[in-house]
Amino acid sequence: MFGIATSTASLGAVIGNIIAGIVIKHPILHDWRKLFILCFILYLIGGIIYLLLGSAVPEKWAILKSQDKQQNGAHSPEETVPMQEQQQKDESKTVEDTETDETITVKA
């Protein structure tokens, strides 16, 4: 999958250079303007397609099972035991900290 994506991206870069060579005959502002307008049109079309068809809502196939459980509030015992142990440790630390009351004096 990664190789296909890399090949496609590289192919786009090569085609872009070929098109730039065809559009820009002489390095003058008029020819560069044509190339920038062409790029603008391509980006505009891509943006419009994304606005019409794109969505920020994840599809069902893109949600991991663990994320789905968290959203539904279902936790297995294996997931909750470490959290409970950590909470107990934190509570015992706060009790120990409040029980010891030492005074430190510094002579300057």
Image (spheres, helix red, strand yellow):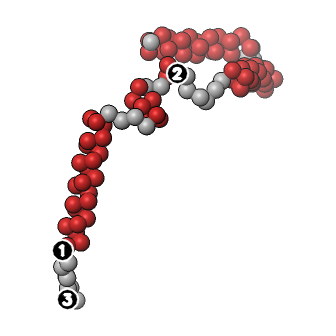
Q: Is residue 2 above or below residue 50?
A: above
Q: Earlier in the sequence, mark 2 or mark 3?
A: 2
What's the amino acid at mark 2?
Lys
What's the amino acid at mark 1?
Thr
10 Å neighbourhood of mark 1: few (<14), some, or many (≥20)? few
Q: Label 3: state its secondary structure.
A: loop
Please state which of residues 49 and 89 is positioned toward the viewer in this rendering.
89
Q: For the N terminus, give its image quadrant.
A: top left
Please state which of residues 4 and 82 is positioned toward the viewer in this rendering.
82
Q: Quadrant of residue 92?
A: bottom left
Q: Earlier in the sequence, mark 3 or mark 1?
A: 1
Q: Quadrant of residue 105?
A: bottom left
Q: How many marks?
A: 3
Residue at which label 2 appears: 60
Give residue 14's position: percent from left, percent from top: 58, 12
| Res 107 label | 3
At 29% from the left and 45% from the top, the residue drawn is 83
